[in-house]
Amino acid sequence: MTIAPERVEETVAPRPSTTGRARFVLILGGLSAFGPLSIDMYLPALPQMAGELRAADATVQLTLSAFIIGLAIGQLILGPLSDAIGRRKPLVAGLALYMVGSILCAIAPTAELLIAARGVQAFGAAAGIVIARATVRDLYSGTAMTKFFSLLMLVNGLAPILAPIVGGQILNWTSWRGVFVCLTVFGAILLAVVFFLLPEPLPEERRTPARFGSVLRKYGSLLRDRAFLGYALASGLMFGSLFAYISGSSFALQGVYGLSPQAYSLVFGLNGIGIVAVGQLNGRIVGRFPERKLLTVGLVIAAVAGFGVLAATVLDLGLIGLLIPLFILVSSIGMVAPNASSLALAEQARSAGSASALLGVLQFVVGGLATPLVGLGGPGTAVPMGIVMAAFGVLALLAFGTMTRSSGASVASASLVAQEA
């Protein structure tokens, strides 16, 4: 079953029914949440896993590395494949593979087999992440696409923030294996929903061959596209700042500032609500302001807030002095992510899968690089977290400002035409 995407020019927004739009938001939001849920839900169980599997902490931590590597490879392969054969087939196959990988994780008798199972799980999860973003580009363009990306923040904006909390609650009544059982159920539900409720968004006439040489040329072309790379790096570096917060805030806020686990969970949840709220604000105002201007505002706010986090940790400005800029920085993701994704994919209608793959790979690779940097100073200081968050926020702004400058005029003109129409 194939449905034609809403063939619209950049100046005309599609008008799906309210029910259909809500369905797409829930399905694509759930698919986008695979990565953060699969990464963060089991983090509270790492010590328990090391003890039960009789493995060193460093060995168990390789399960995270294996997942990030599998996620990157999976996106790079499945993105172009979905451009060639459509979105549904690789998505259904990926979800089935994710379930198999999750089951293997739940029954793994050794750390080595768990690492291998995580790679399988990650390859399947990559299908959900990369195809969800490409599907948005199939169905929408221009401001309508940005609005839809903002709507997705309702579903997946909270995932990387709340996943560790959910994982911790699961551990209250079961072992770490129960976390992977829950992920298996999550994958099964999404597989059923996709199979019965998600029609094919990419018609045959818009598909492109997936020969090895053409795929390499496509990736090479994207990497030489300064505007695309600038938007992708801005998004990826901001996610690096978010990963630094996720991996370092527990030690900083509880170990250094003395928050109880309950108070820390409250702070974590409030910051997640900030992401969602700013995402919805972005969706409401994007028609009145160009995406590029909103992205600039979001990145500037994030960079300034990053310096605020750094100043609070270095100058010991107290808990409130840290929480305020931390909330502002984390919330700015709700403005940066939808606008950066929309602008990066705007000119990639015929290679949305490949472009989506590079966007996703950059996010998780940069996030993977940021995570270990937070712990360099040891458990008794929050300064490394402040340094990493500030540095990645500034780098995101610089990447955007220097690499997309030449495209600013054309993007602004397109946005102006859209507003006038």
Image (cartoon, rainbow, N blue to C red):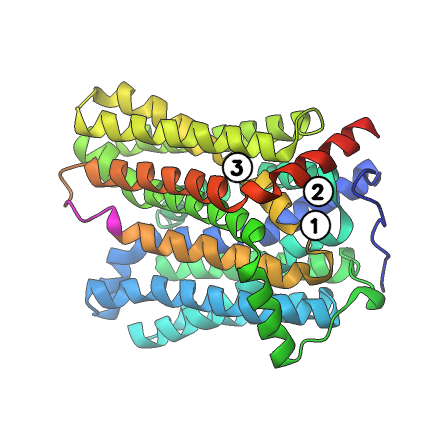
Seen in the image, is 23 located left or right of residue 389?
right
Under tag 3, what secondary structure? helix
| Quarter containing the N terminus | bottom right
**Which residue position holds label 3?**
336
Residue 158: x and y in percent read 50, 39
Report the span colored magenta: 373-377
Say whether residue 376 is magenta.
yes
Residue 46: x and y in percent read 29, 57
Q: Which residue does the image show at 54% across and 55% down from the upper left?
A: 359
Whether label 1 touches label 2, CB < 8 Å: yes
Q: Quadrant of residue 311?
A: top left
Q: Which residue does the image show at 60% across and 69% down from the upper left?
A: 78
> Label 3 vs label 1: CA separation?
17 Å
**Which residue position holds label 2?**
145
Say whether residue 109 is magenta.
no
Looking at the image, is mark 3 or mark 2 earlier in the sequence? 2
Q: Which residue does the image show at 28% across and 25% down from the upper left?
A: 322
- Between 289 and 177, the one lying in front of the other is 289
Looking at the image, is mark 1 or mark 2 earlier in the sequence? 1
> Label 1 vs label 2: CA separation?
7 Å
| Quarter containing the C terminus | top right
The tally of labels here is 3
Q: Amino acid at mark 3?
A: Val
Q: Quadrant of residue 14?
A: top right
Q: Is residue 107 visible?
A: yes
